[in-house]
Structure formats: C-alpha cells, structure tokens
Amino acid sequence: TMYFARGIETTGLMHVSYLIQMIVGLLAGKPIESKEPPRSAAANVFFWGRVLLSAAILGFALAVTLSALFAGNTTMWEGVPEAVSVILFFLLMSVVGMLEGMQIAFFAV
C-alpha cells in the first residue's frame, strides 16, 4: 500500500538508488532535474546519512550472499561449481532488474 511504501522511503532503506541515479547522471553528462526545492543543510545530512546506511546494508547483504554462494551453502544441485552458482545468481538478478524496469515502463505509458 501507499503507507507501507512511504514508510520504507522514510527509513532510507532504498536510498542507495538515489546514489546510483546521481552517478549515472554524472556519467551521462545530463543534470538531474527536480521539482523539489534545494535541501537545507540538516536535510542534506539526513539524506546522505540514509544513503550511507542503505549502501552499508546493501554491501552487507551482498557479502553474506556471496559468502554463502562460495561456501556452497545453497540448494544448488550437487556437482555445480560455486563459480557457476555466482554467475547464475548475477544473471538471474539482472533478469529480475530488467523485469522491474519493464513493469515501471509499462505502467508509465
């Protein structure tokens, strides 16, 4: 629901996506346009704190997932090398990301 989504947005759990957006904008050479007024100093500190928290949580989750994949602590079939499990993980995560992007694009039209 909308309230649940706003709650997650308030926690800053997904704020690393703003960092990725800014990096992609810089690499593309296009400024990011916003209809919001510039943030105050306190709001800026709060924003970047949530970005750092989000990046730390994402890094921890990635470290735990990769260590489990390399240690063989998965439900992958016997005989499949750990490197193949990691490749499959990133391949399937890429597919999920593309499907999410398509879903956003379909509803935006």
Image (cartoon, grey):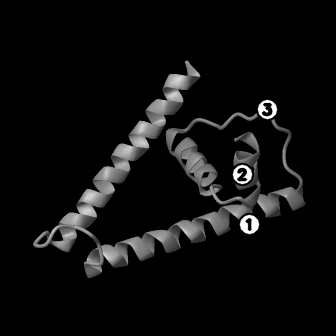
Residue at (81, 62) in percent of width and height: 46
Q: Secondary structure at mark 2?
A: helix
- Residue placed furthest toward the bottom: 71
Quadrant in which residue 73 is drawn: bottom left
Determine contact: label 2, label 1, CB under 8 Å: no
Read off the residue under disc 3.
35
From this view, report whether residue 34 is shown above or below residue 38. Answer: above
Sequence-earlier tag: 2 or 3: 2
Q: Nearer the viewer, residue 54 or 34?
A: 54
**Cα distance between the residues tagged 1 and 3:** 22 Å
Q: Determine the CA span between mark 2 and mark 1.
A: 13 Å
Q: Indicate the quadrant containing the C terminus: top left, top right, bottom left or bottom right.
A: top right
Q: Nearer the viewer, mark 2 or mark 1?
A: 2
Q: Position of residue 58 (x, y in %)?
A: 53, 66
What is the crowding at mark 3: few (fewer than 14 residues within 10 Å), some, or many (at least 20)? few
Disc 2 target residue = 9
Pointer 1 residue = 49
Residue drawn at (53%, 31%), measured in percent from left and top?
Answer: 104
Q: Secondary structure at mark 1?
A: helix
Mark 2 / mark 1, whichever is N-terminal: 2
Q: What residue type is disc 3 on?
A: Lys
Q: Does residue 38 appear to the left or right of 55 in the view shown?
A: right
